[in-house]
Amino acid sequence: MEDREFERLLKITRLKLTEKEKETARKDIEEIIGYFDRIDKIKTTEKPAYQPTEIPTRLRKDEIVPFPDADALKKQSKLHDGYILGPKL
Amino acid sequence: MTSYIREFLGMEKPKGYYTELASEIEKKDAEYHAFTTLNRKIIDCSDGSVPFTTKANICVKGIETTAGSKMLKGYLPPFDATVVERMLNDGKFSFLGETNMDEFGFGTFGLNTEVPARNAFDKDYVAGGSSSGAAVATAMLKYHVAISESTGGSIATPAALNGVVGFTPTYGAVSRYGLIDYANSLDKIGVMARSADDARMVFDIIKGKDEYDTTCAVEKINDEGKDKIYIIRELMEKTEPAIKKAFEKMVDGVGKSYEIKEVSMPILAEAIAPYYIIAMAEASTNLAKYTGYKYGLQYGEFNRRYNDFFTEARSNFGIEAKRRIILGTFIRSESVKDKYYTKALAVRRMIIKEMAKLLNDGFMLSPTLPIPTPRVSDAMKLTSVQNYAMDIFTIPPNLGGFPHITFPYDYMDGMPMGAQLITGHANDYALLDFVSEWEKGFQYKYKHNLGSL
């Protein structure tokens, strides 16, 4: 994997690695991708199986159901006037 | 029929039983690290019921649920997962605590977490993963059942290494509402217990449709016995001689009741790559939601720039999680998606079709792991690819969503060995029947029996 590609992946996944971690991770990742390349040798004309079993489309009624304990959910985060605080855009 | 649940429910418990049990667990767990949370309130609410634990990626209201990750430190779910709600509503069980695991389920030996659980038979050996704590707790406590979860072998592997029964139901038989996702097309909630009948009792409580999980779609669980057992040649070729020898001895015994057939299915020896491609692709999307302000970890430096905030917050992932996020994201890149991800999905269909054909006619039986239990020090030296290779037996049924069960069949140098039986989709009861029969002629061994009466 080229340096540029590796740095691109770190950027889009919002991950930061130390130089030492980068070195180890790249080595591991290259070994793993090399292993994944075995899949090239498998010949198949099957369609992708996104799920292991057939799952019928079955949706709930489109209606509002109040969450039983919404306040508990809010307690997880820092709040300002009842809104969850996040980083500025 | 062996049922520790029934035995316990039928016994008079001395005053202070649960207080004593909690103290015993606390003392022992300082060495084995099976628990991430011990619910001391069980003492107040147990009312003679059987203790159950949940893997730390299953939400329990008000109990810190971290999925083994620093990213979820402090997360208190405001709701119970469906499986927890069903266990509590049944009335026979009390919540005892949450059990240790590899971070987000990423591991074969239980080592990818801050304080790994240790094997219940010998602390120098691995507990197995990712449901390490569930297996160790089951091997330590006489009267207890564990709700656990498997993506690629996370129930079977630790259950085998700790000498307990590990049952992974058909994909879609048990609701996953309240499960912290690893890979949505692979995750399944199951059970660990000290007997097949106890696993069945818990399965009957937790299975069935749930309007909060549309993938929980299995209508009926069957009990179709088989008279043939298939052994896959290409998988046995990857097995260490000592395991092969012990396994063949067991098969000789089973052969008195079943027709044993060794067959060739080369594609199963190639299942590791497609499995990890799919698992990592899905994991990398699931882990995108951990951003340091909505769930668990509160990074709090809101004056930082938008991207810097997320990057700093996400540095709390462990190295294996980071590796899988990077790899999963790479695999999904437009330029290589067809080569890896789409191809892996097609190979999965191929594997499902071949396995389903064989399983229509008989069970598949194998050792659960290709090697004897490794020492912690040895397992830590393995490379990622060597680690993944340990999943050779557990990946095929997990990739295909087939129900499978692991059970102890022998002991080598004092350590348990597990065998794995697989059947077709929705034929889960047939596995539990098989192991119930097995237990009539084989006595499981335990080093600890905390909570004995």
Image (tube, grey):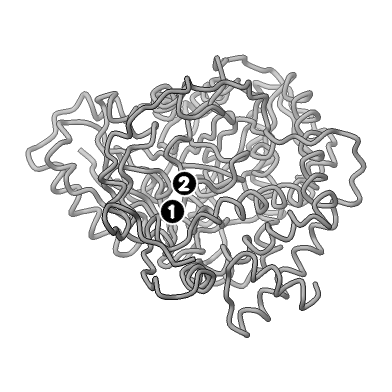
Q: Count residues near mark 1 (Cα–Cα under 10 Å), then give few for <14, some for 14-19, many for 20+.
A: many
Say which residue appears at 77% left-offset and 78% top-offset: A3
Q: Nearer the viewer, residue B53 or B85?
A: B85
Q: Nearer the viewer, residue A16 or B351?
A: A16
Left or right placement of residue B193 versus residue B229 in this view? left
Rendered image quadrant of residue B206: top left
Q: Count residues near mark 2 (Cα–Cα under 10 Å), then give few for <14, some for 14-19, many for 20+.
A: many
Task: Please tell me the numbered disc located at residue B67.
Answer: 1
Q: Nearer the viewer, residue B432 or B190?
A: B190
Above/below status of B369 relative to B421: below
Secondary structure beneath disc 2?
loop
Q: Identify the amino acid type marked 2.
A: Ile
Rendering coords of residue B164 (x, y %): 46, 42
Say which residue appears at 70% left-offset and 56% top-offset: B389
User: Pointer 1 indicates a residue of which chain?
Assistant: B
Rendering coords of residue B311 (x, y %): 53, 71
Rendering coords of residue A30 (x, y %): 77, 70
* Residue at mark 2: B180
Secondary structure beneath disc 1?
loop
Left or right placement of residue B128 versus residue B79 in this view? right
Residues at badges 2 and 1 in contact (C-beta under 8 Å)? yes
The Cα atoms of the two marked residues, 2 and 1, are separated by 7 Å
Q: Identify the amino acid type marked 1.
A: Ala
Same chain for marks 2 and 1? Answer: yes
User: Pointer 2 indicates a residue of which chain?
Assistant: B
Rendered image quadrant of residue B5: top left
The mark total stands at 2
Say which residue appears at 52% left-offset and 46% top-offset: B181
Say which residue appears at 62% left-offset and 55% top-offset: B284
Quadrant (top left/top right/bottom left/bottom right) for the N terminus of chain B: top left
Rendering coords of residue B263 (x, y %): 83, 33
Quadrant (top left/top right/bottom left/bottom right) for the C terminus of chain B: top left
